[in-house]
Image: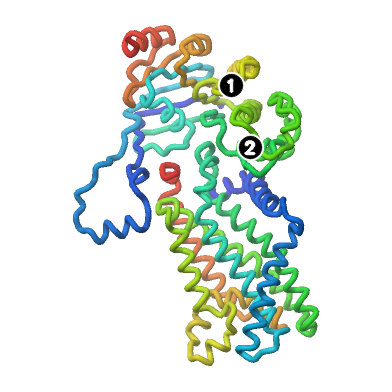
Amino acid sequence: MNYLSGIWAARYFWWHLSMSDLRSRWRRSFFGLFWSILQPLGLTLLLSLVFSRIFGMRITEYAPYILSGMIMWEYVAGSVIGGSLAFVQADAYIKQTRHPLAIYTLRNALTGLIILVTASLALILWVLLVMPQNFGWCWFAALTAFPILGLVAWPGATITAYIAVRFRDLPHALGLIMQAMWFVSPIYFEAATFRNGDLHVLVDYNPIYHLLQIARAPLLHGEWPTLANYAWSLGTIVILGVIAVLVGRASEKRVIFYL
Amino acid sequence: MTNAIRLRNVNLHYASVAFRERSLKSLFATWFSQSRTKRDLTDIHALKDITVHVKQGERIGLLGHNGAGKSSFLKMVAGLYPISSGSRDVRGTIRSMLDLSLGFEPDATGRENILYRGLLLGLSPRAMRSMEAEIVEFADLGEFIDYPLKTYSVGMQVRLAFAISTSVGGDILLLDEVVGAGDARFMGKARARIMNLVEQSEIMILASHDLTTLRQLCQRGLVLADGHIVLDAPIERAIEFYEEKFSK
């Protein structure tokens, strides 16, 4: 509780750091904010052109599947990999003041979340144009994907940040791990593809599938996410949260020695 | 509530893992090579059995050679370093000026950095905006204040950092050497400003090699050597002791 109030007390600080990240990201580019929309959109077009041929699906419906998978996965993977450097980047701040260290990973998670929100505008627009029949009350459920993903990314980044401050080559290893997780999850490939290959396990017991489903079920199918989707997502949040708190409690004070 | 610092039998160790090679690679390497003979780096015992009470209104000077533990002492009081044993009880808000030039966002302008630095120190955006004009004027960077920080020279960065840090007061002031860089004109201004800040603070601890400044600002002196406090006395006595014992 004390810890949370410390994070709250420093709210102006991490909020502004996050905004400054966004500004410097968009400062010297003509399209600015729109890059966050254009980049996944362009990649999606390319991928869906190829994949729709391979799997024989209609491109207009397969493309939003890829796009939704891409932006949400990019956010989680980006936060976990990028967040692993959060303490190292913030060393100057950590050496000068005593804020809760979790604010530095919150900075990463928050920046990424804002980019995700921006990028999801393109997805929503696309779905509205191509599959207008999906629009309905269940889209409110899609909004819950933002806080849920944020609460996955934050403790995830916090855990890797603590490990990476001790083992500086972690980001390389993480890149590999995330790539492997991407490969065995229905992110670009449809869940049906896994099921057809008798790989139900990779769908039903995969938290990544359930996390993505919270936004995908309403947007792409016009359905409410299932209870199982929420249960798996909340379970992931709790487990990551507990690990992050335990790791933090054990090593927060010693981080300054490693910087 | 009165401000005070109470330290009882404080020990501070720097963990040796921090300066060994640290990577997953080396971790795996030690797992696979059974011989664990190479352990040449041990924990550094930076502060040994420190017991000090500081009351409201005291001005303290820290004396000692490089590596005697002055900076470690200040950072421990500031709560940045975790103590390994003993008790540390600090009452009052701490304002430490230890590494001034640390912590700027290179892509943001000077003006934005004033805001960030203020927020880092725990102020609200509104409070910072009201102080901005005064800080800009003191730093005296001209039009550069609206340029990104990475276009600044080292001296300019120090001036900006100094202007910001000294505009925010606190009960307990921790200083590591009064002013570092800056040209002669700025040094004069900076000195006056520090004096003002020292007057406002309830407790001040200054680590310095400049004996004149110490004499001027402090009443009580702590002489540190090899992590121990070897003398705790009025500043004149402490300086005498330090000169005769260490500077031959």
Between the C-alphas of marks 1 and 2, the distance is: 20 Å
Disc number at residue B201? 1
Q: Quadrant of the N terminus of chain B?
A: top right
- Within 10 Å of disc 1 (Cα), the crowding (few <14, some 14-19, many 20+) is many
Query: Label 2 lies in what chain?
Result: B
| Left or right side of B81 for A92 | right
Query: Label 1 lies in what chain?
Result: B
Does residue B114 appear in this view?
Answer: yes
Q: Give the quarter of the image for residue B231.
A: top left
Q: Position of residue B6 (x, y in %)?
A: 43, 27
Q: Which residue is mark 2?
A: B117
Q: Disc 2 residue type?
A: Arg
- Within 10 Å of disc 2 (Cα), the crowding (few <14, some 14-19, many 20+) is many
Q: Is the residue A182 above or below the residue A61 in the image?
A: above
Q: Secondary structure at mark 2?
A: helix
Q: Position of residue B152 (x, y in %)?
A: 64, 34
